[in-house]
Image (tube, rainbow, N blue to C red):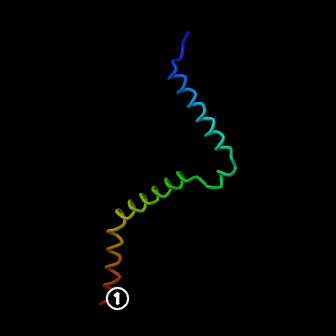
Amino acid sequence: MHHLTDAGLALLTRTTATLHVLGARLHDDRDRERGDVPGWVMITLMTAGLVAALALVAKPALTGLFEKAMATIGG
């Protein structure tokens, strides 16, 4: 039979209480109005990453297109 030490029992109690509070927050309608902040942060970072990657790939083509257009207008 396993016996918990006082420290182990305290840790188990705190963990259980924390999980209970988190579970209650998930079901609280007032918290749903705030939205999913970590999700929006992830979407923003992923979008910034995609824009940066596209800029690296498309920059030479866009530069060439711009220079061609300016040469046509200028001369």
Which residue is at the far right?
29
Which residue is at the far top?
1
User: In the image, what residue occupies the spot 64% across and 39% down?
Assistant: 23
Which residue lies under the disc numbered 1? Answer: 73
Q: Is residue 69 left or right of residue 43?
A: left
Task: Please state which amino acid type lies under the numbered disc 1.
Answer: Ile
**Above or below, comparing residue 31 to residue 9 in the picture:** below
**Above or below, comparing residue 26 to residue 61 in the picture:** above
Q: Position of residue 16 (x, y in %)?
A: 59, 30
**Above or below, comparing residue 15 to residue 42 in the picture:** above
Label 1 Cα neighbours within 10 Å, binned few <14 / some 14-19 / many ≥20: few
Q: Is residue 71 left or right of residue 37?
A: left
**Helix or strand or loop: what does disc 1 sit on?**
helix
Q: Nearer the viewer, residue 14 or 59?
A: 14
- Quadrant the C terminus occupies: bottom left
Query: Dividing the picture into quarters, in which one does residue 17 lie?
Result: top right
